[in-house]
Amino acid sequence: MPMMVFLVLGILQLTMLQQARIMTEYAAYNAARAGIVWNGNNERMHDAAIVSLLPTMGRTDSLVKLGETWALHQLYDTALRKLSWGSPVPQSINGSNLLGFIRVDTINPALYTPINSIWKLPPIQGNTGVNWKELDFDGPDSYPEVPDLARRIGKFFKITMPDSNEEEYRRSTVLTIRVRYWYEMRVPFANWMIFLCWYAANAGVSLSGAFGSEQINYSPVGGGASIVGGNGNKGALPVMATGIRHNKGYATAYQPEMLVLWGLATGQIPLISSLVGKRYFIPLTATYSMRMQSNFHRKWIMHLNPSWGL
């Protein structure tokens, strides 16, 4: 009977986790949809992502329940922002929060790409494209005030003529965003079990032993010499967890953020843990791209160089 109960709890939590992952993809779609019509405004995209993910936080089947769930999100968002994440990600961009419950990362356009040198962008103070404020989404060729247009008009009559500037401009008017969502697992026992397995996998170790024990056996994945003789306190796992990174955009979770997640799961964050006890979060992400339907405003660009905040 205990094994059957644990199995059912695990299935329930994994099902809820899968549903939250699908909802995160839906949130990324809605965030991108808001961004393409709001000039890449991160605040509007953030709001769209929140509304999309509210059903995973609580009931939304009436205005009263929707308000309660929204208030719950605001409470979580405020509490999480006040923690010492130690993340290289800035706290906000133009007032839109980046370190809370839900983050929207604008991956494209990015300022370090060749977009700054494109001749079609109106020159300011003699520097073609360097100080652009907006990217026209539907008519970069319709600017007669661009001095270079006259001598480049030939390409309009020779469709096969290569035009790398045109291609770069076209790529830059595609909005690519990534939504990260700190999903909280709520099913008793299963939440800790799944969190520990996910955390150990990120740390690159395999586990054995009793989940309820302070002493858990772990060793490197793939064999080899064991860590601490094959036995060690699970409190050593945080220093081995490296986080989840991407080739483009901010990391899903940086190593300092993994430490915070561990502290929340083990009740080691004094103020939060004393008030609400242990909380088990797993970061979910989804990426979506759409062609801009309004001019992208430069002020909403996040990434100035290819380091991506690493």
Image (cartoon, rainbow, N blue to C red):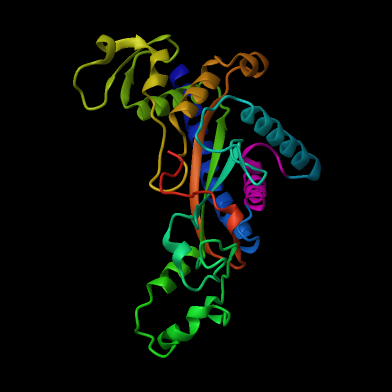
Q: In which quarter of the image is residue 235?
A: top left
Choose between 282 and 65: the one closer to the eye. 282
The residue lying at 41 percent from left, 32 percent from top is: 243
**Extreme-front residue of the structure:** 126
> Is 254 covered by the magenta stretch?
no
The residue lying at 27 percent from left, 15 percent from top is: 227
Indicate the position of residue 297 as horizontal and vertical percent values: 61, 60
**Extreme-bottom residue of the structure:** 157
Indicate the position of residue 266 as horizontal and vertical percent values: 52, 16
Query: Which region is colored magenta?
Result: 42-60
Q: Compared to 31, does 251 lie above or below? A: above
Indicate the position of residue 231 as horizontal and vertical percent values: 30, 10
Q: Compared to 277, does 27 lie above or below? A: below
Residue 160 visible in this rendered orientation of the protein = yes
Q: In which quarter of the image is residue 264?
A: top right
> Is 51 covered by the magenta stretch?
yes
Residue 30 visible in this rendered orientation of the protein = no
The number of discs equals 0
Quarter placement of the C terminus: top left
Indicate the position of residue 305 as horizontal and vertical percent values: 44, 49
Q: Quadrant of residue 35?
A: bottom right
The residue lying at 54 percent from left, 69 percent from top is: 123
Choose between 199 and 118: the one closer to the eye. 118
The residue lying at 67 percent from left, 44 percent from top is: 95
Choose between 125 and 44: the one closer to the eye. 125
**Extreme-right residue of the structure:** 64
Q: Compared to 128, does 180 lie above or below? A: above
Magenta segment, principal secondary structure? helix
